[in-house]
């Protein structure tokens, strides 16, 4: 009887110690979701490299207010100034008769013009399937992986956020296991509710 009580005591002590030690290892998911869902407006620069067999690089300036966002192409020079207004109803290009051809399947949140907008929405409302910590672009980061389905395709978004400010550092987008885009972010600024 004494041995059994001792075993139970040791088991409870080990369980308490193990669970107590896990507290510091809690994931950042809730903190990230709360932060991004509280943002009312902001802006960020993005250098997006799209790969659909042909590699194309875009430098973009993205701003948002509420659920609407505006993405303006800074380069390449041939299409600089083309902007895309993104809302819940879809996306519309604006600039005389110039069209932005990305050579990618038009899946919301997976094209250069709306990848940043889609990423911000994912950060605000989805639960990551994996997370970790690592250095990226010279910054201590939280890495988050989101697995989802997009227009019937297996889709993944990976993002690295500065650990101290939660600002986006870089991200990658995958469809059906193939990386289709990579972005490096700069000049992030945002206002909270």
Image (tube, rainbow, N blue to C red):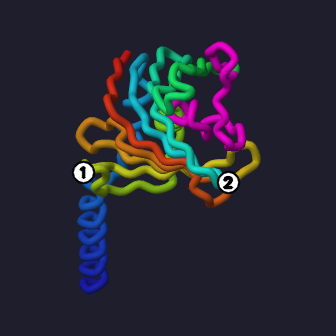
Of helix, strand and loop, which one carries label 1?
Answer: loop
Residue at image point 33% right, 49% down: 142
Q: Nearer the viewer, mark 1 or mark 2?
A: 1
Disc 1 residue crowd, few under 14, some 14–19, many 20+, Cα 10 Å? few
Residue at image point 50% right, 45% down: 49
> Residue 123 at what x, y percent from top left?
47, 37
The image quadrant of residue 193 is top left
Answer with mark 1 or mark 2, whichever residue precedes in sequence.
1
> Residue 2 at what x, y percent from top left?
24, 83
Residue at image point 62% right, 51% down: 54
Of helix, strand and loop, which one carries label 2?
Answer: strand
- 110 drawn magenta: yes
Q: Residue 154's mark?
A: 2
Asked if residue 140 lies left or right of residue 151, the reply is left
Tell me whether circle 1 and circle 2 mark residues in contact (CB < 8 Å). Answer: no
Q: Quadrant of the N terminus?
A: bottom left
User: Front-most of 139 and 18?
Assistant: 139
> How far is mark 1 from mark 2, CA to CA?
30 Å
Asked if residue 167 lies left or right of residue 90, the reply is left
Q: Main secondary structure of the magenta part?
A: loop
User: Front-most of 179 and 25?
Assistant: 179
> Residue 95 at what x, y percent from top left?
62, 15
User: Front-most of 82 and 41?
Assistant: 82
Q: What residue span does the magenta drawing correspond to?
A: 90-118
As drawn, the residue found furthest toward the right would be: 152
- 68 drawn magenta: no
Would you name the residue on which mark 1 appears? 138
- In the displayed structure, would residue 186 be above or below residue 69? below
Residue at image point 66% right, 13% down: 96
> Residue 109 at what x, y percent from top left?
60, 36
Disc 2 residue crowd, few under 14, some 14–19, many 20+, Cα 10 Å? some
């Amino acid at each position: 009887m004494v041995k059994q009580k001792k075993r139970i005591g040791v088991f409870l002590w080990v369980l308490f110690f193990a669970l107590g030690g896990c507290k510091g290892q809690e994931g950042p998911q809730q903190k990230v979701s709360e932060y991004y869902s509280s943002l009312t407006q902001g802006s960020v620069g993005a250098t997006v490299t799209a790969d659909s067999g042909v590699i194309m690089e875009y430098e973009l300036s993205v701003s948002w207010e509420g659920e609407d966002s505006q993405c303006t192409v800074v380069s390449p020079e041939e299409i600089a100034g083309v902007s895309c207004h993104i809302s819940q109803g879809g996306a519309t290009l604006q600039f005389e008769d110039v069209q932005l051809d990305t050579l990618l399947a038009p899946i919301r949140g997976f094209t250069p013009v709306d990848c940043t907008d889609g990423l911000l929405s994912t950060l605000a409302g989805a639960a990551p399937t994996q997370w970790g910590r690592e250095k990226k672009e010279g910054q201590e980061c939280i890495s988050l992986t989101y697995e989802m389905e997009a227009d019937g395709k297996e889709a993944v978004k990976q993002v690295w956020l500065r650990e101290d400010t939660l600002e986006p550092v870089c991200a990658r987008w995958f469809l059906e296991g193939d990386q289709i885009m990579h972005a490096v972010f700069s000049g992030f600024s945002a206002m909270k509710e």
